[in-house]
Image (cartoon, rainbow, N blue to C red):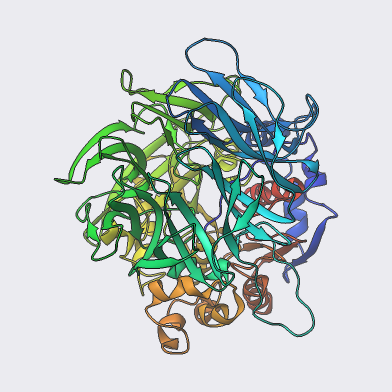
Amino acid sequence: MILRARHAALLAIPLSFLLSSASLAQETTGTKRDVQKRLKAAQKPQGAAPADLDNVLRTLFAAHNFEQAAISPDGNSIAWVEDVHSKNGVVSGSTVIYVKNLKSGAPPRRIGAGVADSLHAENDVSWSPDGQKIAFLSDAAKKGQQQLYVTNAAGGSAKMLTSVKGFLSTPGWSPDGKTIAILFTENATRASGPLVAETPETGEIKDSFFEQRLALLDLATGKLSQITPADTYIYEYQWSPDGKRFIVSSALGNGDNNWWIAELSTLDPATGLMKSIYKPKLEIANPVWSPDGKQIAFIEGLMSDEGLTGGDIHIISSDGGDAKNLTKDMKASAAWLDWLSDKIILFSEFTGGNSAIAALDPSNGKIEQRWSGEGAFSSAGVFGFPFSAAKDGQTIAGIYRSYSHAPEVALITGESPTPTPVTTRNATLKPAWGEAKSITWKNDGYEVQGWLLYPRDFDPNRKYPLVVYVHGGPSHISLSHWPGSHDFSSGLAGMGYFVLSPNPRGSFGQGEAFARANVKDFGYGDFKDIMAGVDEAIRVAPIDSDRLGIAGWSYGGFMTMWAVTQTNRFKAAMAGAGLANWQSYYGENLIDQWMIPFFGKSVYDDPEIYAKSSPINFIKKVKTPTLILVGDSDGEVPAPQSYEFWHALKTLGVETQFVVYEHEGHLFANPKHQRDVIARTLAWFDAHLK
């Protein structure tokens, strides 16, 4: 239920156009007739000129974004994937791959398929064990259908290795360099994962699905063979050091829904035989072999989505048995890991409201922190773009960003723990918002952290409105970050607001006990943490307590709906892809497996636990004007949840506006819709808080 960042760029179009986008599937307003008049007036917000809004939007969409950074095994070269902007500043939908030799000082060199300088979707870089070749995916042969390619790292044309129909991802070389493994969803009609727009279903509805299987490509013969069972979905995999086995995380049935119950198994590529070695109590991610092949390390914890990892580090024998928690009392959340050649586990972690890189000795549990995000940069690698470490662990590549620094590919080396930028793609970008400060407060025995983003051109002699931005999840974290095309919260700071991004109980960053503190308690302890954070923000900054707003997407959208049913302190709200009724939601969404660890039982076995956290059951208390946004093809939080909340507000005479976006999933892909969400949200708060 977490919103993940994607890449987009700004079109220089006026707010009036954004607010009247013809591509919206439905826009419905409440009973008050002045909503549109107030929104139109907000196009020229008090205290902010139209040029300020243009600058905010331009900054939010101007950054070049990076999907991946991969260091060569010897640490001498680095490859990365970045998006492409057209001449007018719009993200073109294409991505390109660059390689840079870190020893020669030569400029980066682009690699790819197709004719020179042609643009395609190219990504998923994988170095050969000897560092001489690079495998990657490209749709150069047919737009929208990627194939596997390989090229020499030193230069030369790329060779297409597959000719398949379906979805490919995550190529990985065998230790001897003779075979490439790859995840393959044959005949898939869309990218994998529940965040993308669902394919509409008509006629008789059946529980049908496409399985992502592990396939092997023999480089000598060019033969591609799927080696895992046809009824099993493979999420992650890694070759064993001797190349004779794999470790995989997998589940039977629907891949979008069953990640939450995935198990660890070893796989014999010669026979296709899978042996389950661990059935976890919670969600697992990132399984990796020890250098001697005797143990598997992985992360287990309470998580909301595949790819958004947080938990404790465990190890288990590669033959199975009991798993050992190596970080049981760690006041942080591990987000990614890998073994180093000296049997030390390198991992990234969330610590408070920051991120860090540390090394763990499995023999004694000793942890040594190598880098902390409390400096100028904050790591983006933990958001689905894993770090990449050279074989000796002395050079680490990642994508770094903070509220004050736009993303760049950077290195951390043994000689210098300070991130050294490799790219300067965004060097000229400056924030369109104010300073970010980490604040902490106490509530119910917890010490809670959050980020307070100051208004642009802050004047300490003025009082400003505040908007609370609640992150998705609930298992997630707000970090210092450079905002992207989905992030309206920084845009608010650019338009003269304080923005509080709290990390209440249920968030990553303070260990598993804190992450699990909202189980069976949605909307109660976590909401109290948020409101205590509002009081602390008012205490430490010149905030007008009569001009408060709240917003969020996914779990943040639920928390927004919940907030307006619990208090009238907020004078405006925006609920994106929110949940109004946990009982009806259980039967509407396509990922119900995620709910059991958080609620304890299904809605059919314990309906009361779902009812007590449903905003719809407290709907008659709402007085706050509420903007509601959702995609019509959202499988994670389906549109009927937003309809239900809007219908109640409309019936009760509460000022509201409801917008449904055509063919959008939980994660919006259309740049026009992304821009509309930001501009519409800014206008809504300007109309009610300024």
Answer with left or right where residue 158 lies relative to residue 256: right
Answer with left or right where residue 285 lies relative to residue 77: left
Answer with left or right where residue 652 lies relative to residue 315: right
Position of 665 relative to 230 (above/below)? above
Whether residue 431 is visible here, answered yes or no, is no
Most distant residue in the front direction: 221
Answer with left or right where residue 611 lies relative to residue 557: left
Residue lying at 62% horizontally and 73% vertically, measured from the top left: 641
Most distant residue in the right direction: 22
- Is residue 481 or residue 120 the one in the foreground? 120
- Counting from the top left corner in percent of width and height, residue 14 is at 80, 39
Quarter of the view holding residue 348: top left
Position of 168 relative to 115 (above/below)? below
- Is residue 605 or residue 396 the one in the foreground? 396
Quarter of the view holding residue 532: bottom left
- Counting from the top left corner in percent of width and height, residue 308 is at 46, 53
Position of 179 relative to 512 (above/below)? above
Most distant residue in the left direction: 364
Quarter of the view holding residue 255: bottom right
Whether residue 300 is visible here, answered yes or no, is yes
Position of 493 relative to 606 (above/below)? above
- Is residue 502 or residue 78 the one in the foreground? 78
Residue lying at 51% horizontally and 59% vertically, measured from the top left: 235
- Counting from the top left corner in percent of width and height, residue 12 is at 78, 34
- Counting from the top left corner in percent of width and height, residue 154 is at 60, 20
Residue lying at 68% horizontally and 75% vertically, measured from the top left: 650
Residue lying at 45% horizontally and 81% vertically, measured from the top left: 610
Most distant residue in the top direction: 105
